[in-house]
């Protein structure tokens, strides 16, 4: 009951497929978002890749196959079908039972706010660097004049 409550009370999508790509588990967030994006009515036991249009079908199948081969990995995707675009992190994790991989557990997290703050930070740093460059350029002339003047005074002594 506690595990079910945790899975259902997260804002992340959680799902798993078996080695035939059939859905074994999914939380309501995953079902709602998958059905909305791909205009489907997905249920446990459905072969998930059958509900995907190309090129998503090939991409997801390749990812599931990588994880079914034993690889654990994470990817970041940008979905442009939303305005503004949505950035998500997807984790693919092999599921083993008695040292045999029987499926893939997947988790997605919306990282749009993080990506947006990264872009904002890069823009702020670029603005800062440009400002310092302008200030340094504007100070070179007067400082050079002061240096030359003081050099002239000390050389005449």
Image (tube, rainbow, N blue to C red):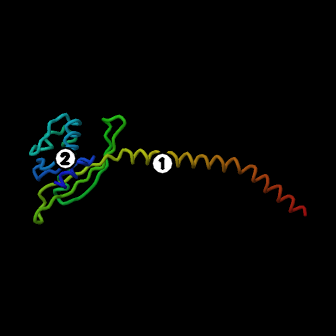
Residue 25: horizontal and vertical position, in percent?
14, 49
Judged left or right of residue 134, residue 83 is: left
Between residues 50 and 33, which one lies in front from this camera angle? Answer: 33
Tags 2 and 1 touching, CB below 8 Å? no
In this view, which residue lies farthest toward the right?
A: 157
Query: Residue at 23% across / 36% down in the picture?
Result: 37
For discs 2 and 1, the disc positioned in front in the rendered view: 2
Instruction: Residue under label 2, please give it.
Output: 27
In the picture, residue 146 is in which quadrant? bottom right
User: Could you say where residue 110 lies in the image, as x and y percent from the top left?
Assistant: 32, 46
| Local SS, label 1 | helix
Q: Earlier in the sequence, mark 2 or mark 1?
A: 2
* Residue that appears at 12% across and 41% down: 43
Q: Please state if 24 lies on the left or on the right of 141 as rendered.
A: left
Give the side of residue 32 with respect to residue 76, left or right. left
In the picture, the quarter occupied by the C terminus is bottom right
Quadrant into which the N terminus falls: bottom left
Residue labelled with disc 1: 121
**How crowded is the residue under tag 2: few (<14 C-alpha within 10 Å), some, or many (20+)?**
some
Residue 100 vs residue 5, the one in the foreground = 5
């Amino acid at each position: 009951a506690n595990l079910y409550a945790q899975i259902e009370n997260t804002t992340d999508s959680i799902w798993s497929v078996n080695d035939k790509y059939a859905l074994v588990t999914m939380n309501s967030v995953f079902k709602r978002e998958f059905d909305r994006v791909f205009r489907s009515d997905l249920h446990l036991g459905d072969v998930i890749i059958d509900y995907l249009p190309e090129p998503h079908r090939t991409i997801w199948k390749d990812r599931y196959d990588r994880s079914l081969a034993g690889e654990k990995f994470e990817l970041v995707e940008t979905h442009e079908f939303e305005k503004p675009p949505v950035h998500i992190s997807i984790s693919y994790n092999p599921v083993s039972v008695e040292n045999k991989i029987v499926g893939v557990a997947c988790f997605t997290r919306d990282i749009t706010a993080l990506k947006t703050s990264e872009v904002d930070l890069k823009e702020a740093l670029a603005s800062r660097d440009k400002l310092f460059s302008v200030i340094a350029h504007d100070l070179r002339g007067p400082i050079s004049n002061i240096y030359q003047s003081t050099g002239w005074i000390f050389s005449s002594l």
